[in-house]
Image: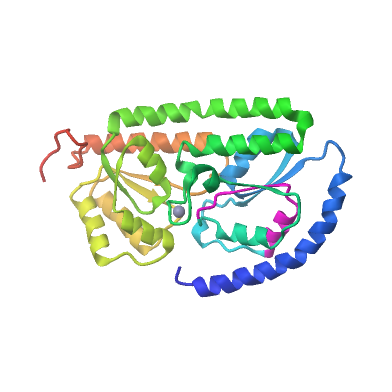
Amino acid sequence: MKNFGSMLNRAQRALKLSKYLAVSAAVLAFGHVAMAADAKIPVVAAENFYGDVVQQLGGDRVDVTSILSNPDQDPHLFEASPKTARALQHASLVVYNGADYDPWMAKLLAASKGSKRVTIVAADLTGKKGGDNPHLWYDPATMPKVARAVSEALVAADPAHKSAYDANLAKFLDSLKPVDAKVADLHGRYAGVPVTATEPVFGYMSDAVGLSMRNLRFQLATMNDTEASAADIAAFERDLREKRVRVLIYNSQATEALTKRMLKLAQQSKVPTMSVTETEPAGKTYQTWMLTQLDALGTALAAGDANGANAAAPGAKGKTP
Ligand SMILES: [Zn+2]
């Protein structure tokens, strides 16, 4: 957070603007009552995977706007704009991650109080807070909780269509079963295997698979846009050069000279790499996105296994350096 001061100033300007906009939001709120019975529920999701899930649960009853939707930008560096404030003022339902992943959301919402908006925060549902790994949607336990809360809010807003929302929720929860099965399969084969990553985005999924994640301080430095220590960089490089890790998980959305250097070193050292993103790519659903990445992880772990890596699961016999 090198530019935290200037970020704060920009956030404050956005807040002032949203206070101004909140006045017109209050006027518009009266208009809601008179809305046609078949009007869609306006929803804003801070991140597009939550938006996708709301869309799956709400079908043609919801009108969803997702704020973070570009898999080529670093969400940790996102700053709220007047456009963000405008989208929020019309929303009946708001979903965001929390745990300091999207601190601009709480600020914008606080600046436009008074509407009958329902807000769902993934961090609140999962007992996470600022300082915890904020990439909650990679924890297989998170999305079922978010989905249930969203479905409940949709039923409350539009009770006439309860049976449709209930059916959509059941279908969604069912569609997560292949993800859970894949996690269990990988866990059975690779629990305890050491891996590393350039940024903590995949951390919860790695934990679910039972992998042993190394170089966490380095990853936090990448996430927070601070400099990793010389010792942490050296440890990371040694893990790759000496193949002490089976796979390098590379966040293609949080890249800088140092993480690119690690990717190159992994390739030179023949440590398999897999690329992950923070934002759901176009053309994917949350479910297919998770499955694709788990498949890529399985492929990378299998390649690392066949590659004579020194990294072995506890109890397994690894080659000595
Ligand atoms: Zn991240």
Give yes or no for residue 121 being in the magenta stretch. no
In the image, 226: left or right of 21? Answer: left
- Tell how many labels: 0
Q: Is residue 72 above or below residue 33?
A: below
Is 292 displayed left or right of 313 in the figure? Answer: right
The correct choice, above or below, for 20 with respect to 61 in the image is below
Where residue 238 sits: x, y (%)? 20, 55
**Residue located 32% across and 58% down the image:** 218
Q: Position of residue 203 (x, y in %)?
A: 39, 46
Farthest residue in the right direction?
Answer: 34
Q: Which residues are magenta?
A: 82-99
- Which sits in the foreground, 23 or 36? 23
Q: Is residue 153 left or right of residue 284?
A: right
- Looking at the image, what colour scheme do you see? rainbow
Residue 190, percent across and down?
28, 33
Residue 74 visible: no
- 90 inside magenta stretch: yes
Quarter of image, res 156: top right
Q: Residue at x 61, y 38 (%)?
A: 149
Quadrant of ligand 1: it is: bottom left
Q: Give the quadrant of residue 27.
A: bottom right
Q: Is residue 298 left or right of residue 35?
A: left
Question: Residue 158 at x, y = what percent?
Answer: 77, 35
Residue 146 picture quarter: top right
| Res 175 visible | yes
Return the residue nearer the eye: 53 or 122: 122
Q: Quadrant of the N terminus?
A: bottom left
Name, please, the residue furthest toward the left.
Answer: 320
